[in-house]
Amino acid sequence: MQNKHPRLLLLAIAAMLAGVSCSKNNNLKPDQGGLSEGDRNVSTEAITPTPHCIAYVEVNDNALKNAGCFTLSNGKPVVNTAVIFAGNINYYTNPSTGAKNPVVKLNAQVTYLLTKTTYVQDLKNKGIKVTLSLLNNHDGSGWSSFKNQAEMDYFAKSVKKTIETYGLDGIEIDDEYSDASSATVESTPKAIDAIRKLLPNIIIGHYLFSDKVSPSSVLAYKFADGRKFADMIDYALPDYNVNPDNYLSSIAKNKLFFSRQASSSSIQTDATKAKNNGYAGVMLFNVTSGSTNGMSQVAKGFYGTSATVTVPSGCNAPWDRATIEKGPETYVIP
């Protein structure tokens, strides 16, 4: 584990809590819970508009709904895409057959969010896309560590089940916290290829951090038939304070974001650069009910220094972690 930036400290705490505080599993299989077919509203378009604001919400501690509370003077939300941080990738062992495969795992907080609240649909009703970050979780499975095509295909089916069950618009790759003894550059691209075959129209983003292989080498990956991995994803997020230009040899500028903590004082500068120079936009990590200043910086950078951001009375939602932690976790079994 690397404590490279503040995000990792949050992740380390969240990973420990997610791993030990849930006493029972909800092994989601076809026709168990979730939305009906008629209620699903899966994305059919890429990241728009540009410049674009992505808000990561650490839902172990914060209500996802709050991402839609920051409103411009015209009534539109500042946030264009809200990312649920985070789902996990973990092995699931079938108790009957003993077969072990990587699947999407949702801790108690994410399970509660997706099954007991209307927050995802609340945001979508405001025109905000909602995606799920998928993060490795210390057991040898993970983006850079798929062992073979069969594992990738099984995981792709689990992702499809997750998207369709919960009405999400897409996923994000976050290759951190893998305990695998080895990793390969082609693992992530081939896994995304398998996912794209099942879900050609979802949003797929890539946070450019890896604890096993270089994110630059993954982003530049080319398949034997000439296809480019960078063409399969909708956007890429360099790590905090990393210049997006470092990746221009692998991916177009209009797919690259500036990444900051939501409490950063440099957000307006980045937002202005994004607007004036053709970047995709700005990502803010750890957006909370108190992130009005960060969102105001985004608005001023995107729309001019006179832009204002307000939070409607009663919009911010409470999040009772002590209660939520008593709930189940979910393995999404295809």
Image (tube, helix red, strand yellow):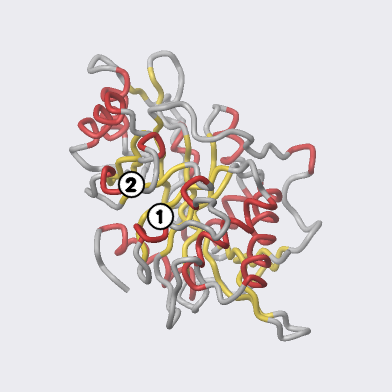
Decide if residue 34 is on the left or right side of residue 1: right
**Image-quadrant location for residue 301:** top left
Kind of residue at badge 1 = Ala
Decide if residue 52 is on the left or right side of residue 265: right
Residue at 63%, 65% (x, y): give it. 155
Residue 89 image point, x, y percent: 54, 67
In the picture, the quarter occupied by the C terminus is bottom right
Decide if residue 160 is on the left or right side of residue 282: right
- Residue, disc 2: 249
- Residue in the foreground of this view, choosing between 49 and 288: 49
Residue 108 vertical position relative to residue 302 in the rendered view, above or below: below
Residue at 47%, 46% (x, y): give it. 83
Decide if residue 145 is on the left or right side of residue 220: right
Residue at 51%, 58% (x, y): give it. 134
- Per the image, label 1 sits on a secondary structure element best described as loop
Tell me how far mark 2 sits from mark 1, CA to CA.
Answer: 8 Å
- Residue in the foreground of this view, choosing between 159 and 222: 222
Kindly check if marks 2 and 1 are in contact, taking CB atoms under 8 A apart as contact: yes
Residue 73 vertical position relative to residue 199 in the rendered view, above or below: above
- Residue, disc 1: 220
Q: Residue furthest front?
A: 225
Residue 14 image point, x, y percent: 41, 65
Kind of residue at badge 2 = Ser
Q: Is residue 207 visible?
A: yes
